Structures are given as C-alpha cells and as structure tokens.
Amino acid sequence: MLPVAGKERRVVIPAARALPVWIYLPEKIKQPDRIIVAVHGISRDYQNHFAAYRKLADKLGCGLLVPEFSRATFPRYQQLAKDAGSQRADTELNTLLIALRVQLQQPFLKIHLCGYSGGAQFAHRYAMLHPQNIASLVLCSAGWYTYPDSEFEFPYGVSNWPTWLGKLRLKEMMKLPTLVMVGELDTKREKSLRQSKALDAQQGRTRVERAVNWVDAVNKVKQQSSDGLVEFRQLPAVGHDFKASAESGGMMFHIESFWKEIEREKVCIA
Amino acid sequence: MSRIHTAKRSFVTRNVNLNDGHSLSSQVPEEGDLVLARVDRIRQHGRLENVDGRRVHLFKGDELILVAGNRYATDQFHAVTPNKLGSCQLVAAGGIAANVVGKSAQVKPATEITLLGTLIDQAGKKLNLKDYRKLQPSYIHPNTASIPVLMVLGSDMNSGKTSMACSTIKGLSCDGLKVAGAKLTGTGAGPDYWKMLDAGAFRVRDFVDNGHPSTVGLSVNKLIDLLRIIKSDAQQSDADVLVVEIADGVLQPENQKLLSDPRFLQEISGAIVAADSATAAVYCCERLIQHGIPVHGLGGLFTRSELSSEEVGLQLGLPVYRLEELQRPATANYLMNLVSREQDNGLRCAF
C-alpha cells in the first residue's frame, strides 16, 4: 500500500520483498512522472537520506523513494550484485518501478537517481544498464567508479562487461544529465575506501581525486557527441559525511538547482 | 480379446488398469469417465497419443479408448463433456472426447467420433480417472512450504511456456539439482509430460495423476489443493525444486482466479514468463508483479526477435532469457538462489 499524500510509509512490495523502501508522496504533486530515488551508502543510513530528500521532494513536487539495501541480501549492492548467482539490486529496484508505474498510473515514470558513497557507486552502474529509467543522475562521494573505458576491465572499466548483468548502454547513459559532488575534505584513505596500486593509478588516491578524474573521463566521452557535460561541485568544509554534506555542505542546494535547470530546459524544449 | 483391449488406448488413460473394464454401458458419460469411441471422419487430429507417448495414426472405423472431458484451448477447441452417447469429437490428441462449442479459425474442424459406450467394471461401476489417482489428497506433506516452486506462466497458449519450463529443468538438473516437473493446469497431453522427463526432471506429475482429464472449470480451491498435493509429492521424493507450468495465459478464467488468490501466491516462490510478443511479455509481467509474484526473467517466442527482446529489456529492466541461456547451470543457479530465498521469506500477498 502506498502512503497517503503528505505522509511517508515503509513499503514492502510483495513481488520485491527483498527490498523494503520508504516512500513519500508530497501533497502537491507537480511532476507526477518523476520520482526521486535516493540510495544510501554502506552504512545503510537510509533514515538520513529520507529526511534530507523529503524536503526536496516537497519543493519539487515529486515523490520520493528511499530503498533499504540490507547487508544480508545485497552485500555488494554497490556493484549491483555480489556475483552471477546472487540477488541483484538493480532488478529488484526495477521490479519496484514496474509496480509503481501501474499503481501510480504513470507508465512513463522516470527516476531522479541520487546516490551517496556506496549509493553513488550503485547509481552510476545502474545508469550504465538502465538509463531508460533515469531522468537525471546525482553522484556524491563515491569511493571509486566504473569508467566508460574499454581499456580497463569491469568493474574498473567496461572491458569484459559481465554478460549476466545484461546489455551495457553507455551511449544512452552519456545522454543523462549528471551532477557529481564530493566534500572538499573527503581526502582520508580510511578502511572503507577501496585501495590498490592499480586503482590509485587509474582513479586517484582520494574520493576527491577520483571524482575529478571520473568526471574528466566521462566528459571526454561526452565531448565526442553533443551531450551536455557532467556538472561537478566540491562541497566546502565537509569530509565523508552524508549528514554534514546535506546540512552544511550545500549538497541539497546544488541538487535542487540542478533539477530546476533540467526542468527549465524541459519547458524550453517543449 | 475384448474390444476394450484391442481399441487404441489414449494417453490420458495411462493410470487406469484396463483389466477393470468388463463391458460397455449405455450410461451417460461424465467428466473423467472412460469411453469407447469409433472414428467416423478424420479432421484436425489424425493421430492419437498412446500411453507410451507414440502418436498412433488413426483410420476411419478405428475404435479408441478416450476420456470424456472439457477443453479450453485458444488455438484449438473450446469443448464440453458430452451429455449423451453418440456423435461428438476428438478435441485433444491426448484422448479427450467432447462436444465442440467453438474453435480457432486456424485449425480444421475436430475429428468426428461416435461414443459407443461407457466402460464399466464387473460391478457395473463406470471407470473414471478419479479412481486411478497417483496423487492422493491424503499425501499432503505437513511441510510443503519448504520446497521452492518456480512457476512458468505465459501470455497465451503456444507462447513458449513448455520450452522455457523444460530448458529451466535442464539447467537446474545440469547444476546438480533434483528437479520435479509438473503441469498444474491444462488438458491431458503427452508432449509436455515427456519433454519434462527428457529435460532431466526425475519425476513429472499433472492433473491427470489427480483424476482430471483437464482442469477446465475446476474451482480455485481444487487447483490450490492440487498444487499442494503435487508439492507434497515432490517433497516426499526429496526434490530440491519444483518447476510448475501453468497452461494457457494470464487472462484464462481459472488462471485469473488463481493469481488473485493469496493462498495460491503462498505456494509460489517466483515466476518466469513466456510470451509470444514484446507487448504480451510486458503486460504479463506487470500483471504478475501486481499480484505479488516476483518475476525472475522473461522469454518465449518473442526472443526469436532481437528487436522484441530489446523492447522488453528496455521496458522492464528484467532479464530476458533465450532457451540456451536457461539451460546454462549459471542461470539455473541464479534462479534457484532467488526461489530458495523467496521460499525462506514467508508470507506474501498482492500489492
């Protein structure tokens, strides 16, 4: 059951029971064919995500969905699945979207997909497989990335893309309006940051370097077509901290501006 | 030898001990009753499946042992149990005698037969499939919930369900699993039964094993009981997983009732969908998800077209499998993990 307008609710859709989600539908829906999907990091702090994005959902007038990717069922949701035999985070989310499109009577429903840290890893890899579901992509403070580069093997690049994941749709992903952010103090090499000589050499040593380098790599590809470039923002005076990024780092302000710009462009095109 | 023993015997009578057939009676046949029939004019079905699976050729004047019953087949016949002896039709190669009330334009009229009599035993009791059940209601295992059940459901008749079910059985058995196969609904017929066995199922059961020549018109309660009985049978024989094919499409009346019943949903761990077109695949998938059934993949006739496969993949974002992919142990392992996990998760109801 979906929540009534203005209220939030934890929903377990029977056909996607492995993935409980928090859903919020604002009282004034201005964008019925859009829903924000905010994906938590590996600390699974979905409550903080819900609180931060709820305000944005009200401002923009579109629904909000915050999934709970549990450690037990989705131990490596950041990479979409642990291995070929494991439950996939992306298809579970897609099952939810199929149900929502019918329930909300919005057959063309698309998502504003946002991820923080491990959630940003999930978001950009999801976008490589399912760009058709996405209206915009927001990545904040990912620990490392998959490059749109066939010189590097998956998961660092797209060479040897696993067939069990499905068709890689890079060209379509490149067309997505994309915003990348990272805290300017997010430079610590703590235990949760994946580290290796090869990774450091390819992507940089810190989340800041890795964000800058990935944006450069993607924009190089985008420059070969007429696709708009990835926007990049450093969040002042914050490290690797979702709450601080949202409350004092200006993360939500940048997201709001980014979405408003997309809407303006949509209106201009129309 | 009596006419009963020299007649060509049909597949749906496979569980019956024909030695019980003492003589013919003029009693009106009821659903499940065995009848002796004579071929008058060969039309759509020129062959009859015998109990060993061979499709024996028919000739005018042949005498056949058939079963009176109903049929619901969108690509063939809509037919009902005869209400008297005399003229009627052979409406399924598995051996169903019925009166045709409608047919698909793509088939010839049904082969014409005359019912000569109803088989009775020495005590004068009619021989009926219900008296020769392999699956008994008393067999319901107390712990049927623990066996994972992968359902194969389709958009329509001839959408590729059996091929998908059998490819899945092949993949699962190649992955080292003990796989039971079943057809929960449909009309008694050999091809699906034999194909499941050939694909690697160590055991195959269907509604005929529970005394029904077809499942047309069966109540939802009876169908759910039948599924529980089949699950129990699979469990008692130590199956790791049960692959159940549901005949016809999601709009078939009994299927609609089944999918809307929470008790049925409780018995299913997940589904794969067969469809004959991209549009049908998307519709079926949406229907199943709305009913609360996890859809783990789609396939069927539409996968013959790369463009249709692409349309389905883009619209749903769920795996699309060609038959050879379902036969791979890696795919089987993935599906098995999903249905096993779902089985552990407990109660489900529609969204």
Image: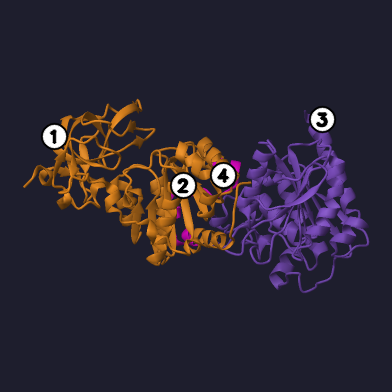
Chain colours: A purple, B orange
Q: Is residue A34 found left or right of A156 in the rendered image?
A: right
Q: Is residue A159 found left or right of A209 in the rendered image?
A: left
User: How many callouts does the rendering have?
Assistant: 4
Determine whether the residue tagged by mark 4 lies in a helix, strand or loop.
helix
Q: Where is residue B5 in the image (x, y as percent from the top left)?
A: 12, 47
1 and 4 marks on the same chain:
yes
Query: Dot 1: within a 10 Å radius of its alpha carbon, few (fewer than 14), some, or many (20 or more) residues?
Result: some
| Foreground of the two, B145 or B86 | B86
1 and 3 marks on the same chain:
no
Judged by depth in the image, the label closer to the viewer, 1 or 3, is: 1
| Foreground of the two, A130 or B50 | B50
Determine whether the residue tagged by mark 2 lies in a helix, strand or loop.
helix
Does residue A174 appear in the picture of this structure? yes
* Region rendered in magenta: B312-333
Q: Mark 3 points at which residue?
A: A268
Q: Which mark is residue B59?
A: 1
Q: Of the residues shown, which amino acid type is indicated by label 1?
A: Phe
Spatial CA distance of label 1 from label 4 is 49 Å
Q: Which mark is residue B313?
A: 4
Q: Of the residues shown, which amino acid type is indicated by label 2?
A: Asn
Spatial CA distance of label 1 from label 3 is 75 Å
The numbered mark 3 sits on a residue in which chain? Answer: A
Callouts 1 and 2 close, C-beta under 8 Å:
no
| Foreground of the two, B21 or B108 | B21
1 and 2 marks on the same chain:
yes
Q: Position of residue A180 (x, y in %)?
A: 80, 53
Q: Name the residue under label 2.
A: B221
Sequence order check, earlier mark of 4 and 2 = 2
Determine whether the residue tagged by mark 1 lies in a helix, strand or loop.
loop
Q: Is residue A260 found left or right of A149 in the rendered image?
A: right
Q: Of the residues shown, which amino acid type is indicated by label 3?
A: Cys
